[in-house]
Amino acid sequence: MKNKIITTLLVFTMLLAAAGCSKKEEAVSADAPKEVIRIGMMSSSDVIPYVLINENNLADKYNFELDLQVFTSAKDRDAAFQAGELDGVLTDYVGICMYQNAGFDVKITGITDGDYILVAGKNSGITDISQIAGKSIAISENTLIEYTLDSILKANGMEAADVVKEVVPRIPDRLELLRNDQIDLGLLPEPFATLALADGAIQLGTANENGLYPAVSAFSQTALDSKNEAIRNLYKAYNEAVDYMNETDLSEYEKTVIEAVGYPEEMIGKVEIKPFRTSQLPPKEDVEAAVAWASEKGLCDASLTYEQVTYDVYSEAK
């Protein structure tokens, strides 16, 4: 009987020790450094869910750290990306084609919901998109803006040659030309589109209205290999942030929108945000259409495939 009691006590002691080790291991795991995800972006409506990830503590919930780096120039953003200072970027189909053409293996991992608004100057006399033939429009050449313009024209039965493209690299300069009646049309992202409309410009159509969502999020293959789980968790947090946006009155997070997009403070109470989509891979036909356009411009090889430029972070990790 005595031996049975001793044996029972030994077993109980071993179980307690094992439980203690287990708790210690859990504590070490909880205190382990979080993977840092560095994303480069420019101020636009695309960035709102990413800012909310940090503001709503979703990065902590999904066990990663999100380092958002805002650039005023796409050139500077891309230089930092290629130098390995960023893991990912908010970019677009054309940018992906150009990365690949330069031998930089970058994969589309998600969609974003920025829009591009075609507007006519308030004194241009243009009130409908059917009136824009022969009119001048400020664009950046061989970029998302030119691709979006060509797509909008095509959707409305026109060709790229039907308008006069004036190359103006900086978006603020395009807005000023429009304001000063030195250009007829502008294709602008936020916050510039809203600023133009507030000055009296006429909205003629948008990329999204024509079924075009050319902006995407993307990561280097190097980052996808080394930070795979954290990047997958990023998109879980992104989708939770989108759900929050779609289910919450804008007044609750309007200050975040004003700061993230770059609206002036006088726009408080005047900003409108359309429902955002949760992230997923973009449609194959949309990517292929962009590759075809970019290859005609000499920006990438026409043989570039959907599988080469996308990476599925939504299915279970293999």
Image: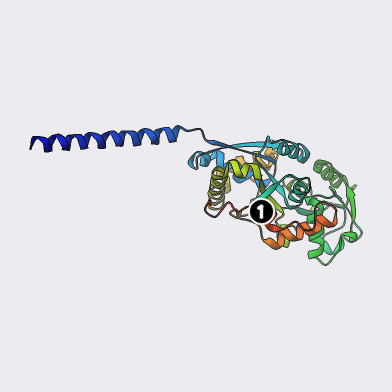
In the rendered view, does 4 fall on the left or right side of 262? left
Task: Residue type at mark 1: give it.
Answer: Thr
The percent position of residue 137, horizontal first and vertical second, equals 87, 52
Front one among 36 and 154: 36
In the rendered view, does 272 fall on the left or right side of 167? left
Q: What scheme was used to colour the molecule?
A: rainbow
* Rendered-image quadrant of the N terminus: top left
Q: Residue at x 36, y 32 (%)?
A: 24
* Image mark count: 1
Front one among 94 and 99: 99
The percent position of residue 42, horizontal first and vertical second, equals 71, 41
From the image, tell me which residue sits under label 1: 310
- Residue 264 in view in this figure: yes
Q: Residue at x 42, y 32 (%)?
A: 28
SS label for mark 1: loop
The percent position of residue 176, horizontal first and vertical second, equals 84, 42
Among the 4 quarters of the image, the one containing residue 296: bottom right
Among the 4 quarters of the image, the one containing residue 13: top left
- Residue 128 in view in this figure: no
Among the 4 quarters of the image, the one containing residue 212: bottom right
Q: Does residue 162 sit above or below 74 in this rendering?
A: below
In the rendered view, does 253 fall on the left or right side of 81? left
Q: Residue at x 69, y 58 (%)?
A: 306
In the rendered view, does 273 fall on the left or right side of 75? left
Front one among 68 and 252: 68
The percent position of residue 156, horizontal first and vertical second, equals 80, 65
Q: Residues within 10 Å of mark 1 (few under 14, many from 20)?
A: many
Farthest front residue?
A: 3
Q: Does residue 4 sit above or below 166 in this rendering?
A: above
Front one among 141 and 218: 218
